[in-house]
Amino acid sequence: MGYHSDSYVTKKPKRLTILVTSTQRRGAEVFGERLAIGLPSRGWSVDFVALGRGTDGTSSVTAEPLSPVPVGRLDLDVVRRLRARLSASQPDVILANGSSTLHYGVVATRTLHHRPPLAYSSIGEPRYWADTPRKRLTFRVFLAFVDQVFSVSHPTATQLTEQFGISERRIRVLPTGVPDELYAVERHRHEPPLRILYMGSLSPEKNPLAAVEILANLVPGTPAILRMVGDGPLRHEIESAARATNLGQALELVGSVEDVRPHLAWADVLLLTSQTEGLPAATLEAAATGMPSVAFDVGGVAETVHDGATGRLITPGDVTNAALALATYAADPDTRLAHGRAARAMAVSSFTIDLAMARYDRALRELVSGDDKA
């Protein structure tokens, strides 16, 4: 493939606006915050902005919201506020980080007297979020006004080309990274039961009900506990499913947390049941702590889980084989620990936060200078 992804560090001061959809702590918002924190040490002045405030009661990133409520469809008042913000801050480049930021970023910058380059970071799988002809046409039109597209994995970059006809030269693959503190999490060999960790929103695209079904297939033949870290609209359905399958204390619902380290230290294996993923943070965070993953093979998951080496890749939706993979790890802790060590080595070599900062620093500076090869 012709996608390019490389890195260097340079120190010329530049102004950057990072735009995220909301203040809620979701994948795109969390990584946007990490960029906002990490890039100033590389000479950037960062303005971290959210289109709207997150749902009440959820933990938040530090972005300043333009609207006091969550933003859905194109809100012209929010567009005006964003345009005024950009006119005042005069950024050298804008990074629209996922979801609705594409539409708002394009519309707000069209009439700016000083129009900086606009990069759009595609966090998820295009095949999933542009799943109708009308959506594909809309995104194709808006992406035509973007100076460069950043994609988190090679599979999602390929989907951008196939779905929207974007040339490989306009796409840059920039994987995310894992913060240093997660590499310091201490891992211990635990006695049974097998401790399984699910980290993610309890929402349809993450398919958490499949995790409950996998646990039901595992217990009582293999003693196991599934801890689910995250919250969302499917929580009540998960509780009902747990009661229907008599899981009792084998299922723990923790809710949203700001610090996942205690849960990563607690677990033996990560379970990822998503229907779609760009480059899953959960499997990378598990790998950084020396934990293998059992994961449905969607999107860019295979770039974070190497089957039979750092974890197990499962055909999407195959709860029987997912349960079998977990049972195998329970019966063979030596292999589980060896896969965890290999996962950590993979994360150290390719997915540190320092590597991610260097990649974004270089890509953004080349975009500012016009040397983006696009």
Image (spheres, helix red, strand yellow):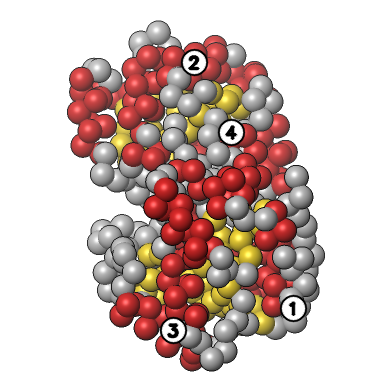
Cα distance between the residues tagged 2 and 4 = 19 Å
Could you tell me which secondary element the residue under label 2 belongs to?
helix
The image quadrant that residue 359 belongs to is bottom right
Work out whether 31 lies above or below 297: below
Q: Earlier in the sequence, mark 1 or mark 4?
A: 4
Q: Earlier in the sequence, mark 3 or mark 1?
A: 3
Work out whether 328 lies above or below 339: above
Q: Which residue lies under the disc numbered 2?
A: 321
Using residue 212 as the reference point, say whether residue 19 is left or right of it: right
Query: In the current view of this chain or complex, which residue is farthest to the top?
Result: 221
Judge by depth and name the residue closer to the eye, 165 or 5: 165
What numbered label is drawn on residue 369?
1
Cα distance between the residues tagged 3 and 1 = 23 Å
Q: Earlier in the sequence, mark 3 or mark 4?
A: 3
Q: Which residue lies under the disc numbered 3?
A: 83
The image quadrant that residue 214 belongs to is top left
Nearer the camera: disc 2 or disc 4: 2
Residue 282 in the image: x percent, y percent? Answer: 51, 42
Question: Badge 1 local density, few (<14 within 10 Å), some, or many (20+)?
Answer: few
Nearer the camera: disc 1 or disc 4: 1
